[in-house]
Amino acid sequence: MRTSSSSIRAAELAERAEAAYLGLALGDALGATVEFMTPREIRAQYGVHNEIRGGGWLRLKPGAVTDDTTMSLALGEAILADGGRVEPLSCARAFDAWMRAKPVDIGNTVRRNLVAFRRSGEPVAPPSEHDAGNGAAMRVLPVALATLGQGDDVVRTAVRAQAHVTHNNPDSDAATEFLALAVQDAIGGENLRGVYRRRIRPIVDDKPAFAYRGRRRENPSGWIVETMQAVLQALLDTDSFEDCLVDVVNRGGDADTTGAIAGMLAGALYGRDALPARWLKALDPKMREACAAQARKLVALTSA
Ligand code: MN
Ligand code: MN
């Protein structure tokens, strides 16, 4: 039996990676119930929404996830098939196949640019100041896991390779690169203070709009700026996985996606044991297993 520090470390990394991926799926499943509701409507219907119960505008079964999780899984499969490389054409083909399988939901920017890819065969969307939705950020986790320990420049390049298939926009890029790097730091053992110092403070210095320094950001739209405001507030105002996710989804708006993004960050930060057992039990078992298995395969690419 190997008991070297590197093998112990690899086991810890794999467990944190799994927690991030399960966190993404849990946030998606929790938030989908209240997507497009206002905080007031959520309070009237649920008090505090803190159980995975399905429903919502998509009429989901309890434990079902949406595009945030299934696009991530499609992207991760493409990365694994390419031996860990993030190739725009492979990503575009994987997203196109995902769209053909009729997902329960799909963002407008994703749909428009995948339809354009079908026509042109060109996997990189043209730069657009309007394509600042959160669709590239919500699915970035497999890139973060596949590029662990490869350095910021490699990570940023890989992040943009997947992002620009549908979202070629500087605000989307900044947020999506930040998420990948922050998740990597947390998987590597940084706590919230460390992630704040290394990643959150620099991103809000660069993009002050990402920090909503006023009242609480409620009803965040699919615009990446509002998504970041809600996620960063929820992350910084809480100190546990469950509190962070309950905080962010009860803001309503694009709650499955804020839940998914907060979930990947908080899962990486707080670890596998912090994920509520009742939520894991409620999550669609096929998705739970797919996320855990893919997380471990992706980190094995770099720790092997
Ligand atoms: Mn969704
Ligand atoms: Mn959404």
Image (spheres, grey):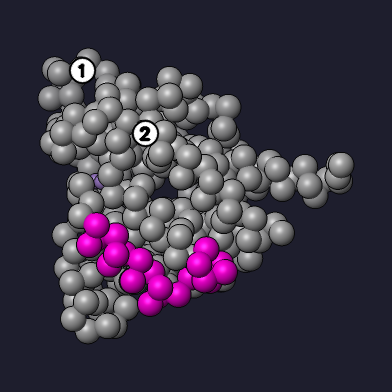
In screen coordinates, is 270 left or right of 241? right
Splitting the image into 4 quarters, where does residue 230 fall? top left
- Which residue lies at the image location 45% right of the left edge and 75% below the top edge? 87
Location of the N terminus (image quadrant): top right
The residue type indicated by label 1 comes to Tyr
Q: Is 132 positioned to the left or the right of 90 in the image? A: left
- Which residue sits at x=21%, y=77%? 118
In the figure, 133 relative to 170: above or below? Answer: above
Residue range in magenta is: 80-101
Question: What secondary structure predominates along the stretch shown in magenta?
Answer: helix
Q: Is residue 17 left or right of residue 228?
A: right
Seen in the picture, residue 155 relative to 221 is either above or below; the reply is: below
Q: Report crowding for label 2: few under 14, some 14 to 19, many 20 or more residues within 10 A (C-alpha).
A: some
User: Of tags 2 and 1, which is closer to the observer?
Assistant: 2
Q: Is residue 277 left or right of residue 304?
A: left
Q: Residue at x 53, y 46 (%)?
A: 293
**Please, what is the three-letter code of the amino acid marked with disc 2?**
Asp
Front-most of residues 70 and 5: 70
Looking at the picture, how far across and down is residue 67, in whole percent?
28, 50
Which of the marked residues, 2 or 1, is nearer the chain's N terminus?
1
Disc 1 element: helix
Residue wearing tag 2: 284
Residue 239 visible, this orientation: no
| Disc 2, SS | loop
Q: Quadrant of the C terminus?
A: bottom right
Residue 10: which numbered mark, if any? Answer: none
Q: Which mark is residue 46?
A: 1
Q: Position of residue 128 (x, y in %)?
A: 22, 73
Occupied quadrant, residue 98: bottom left
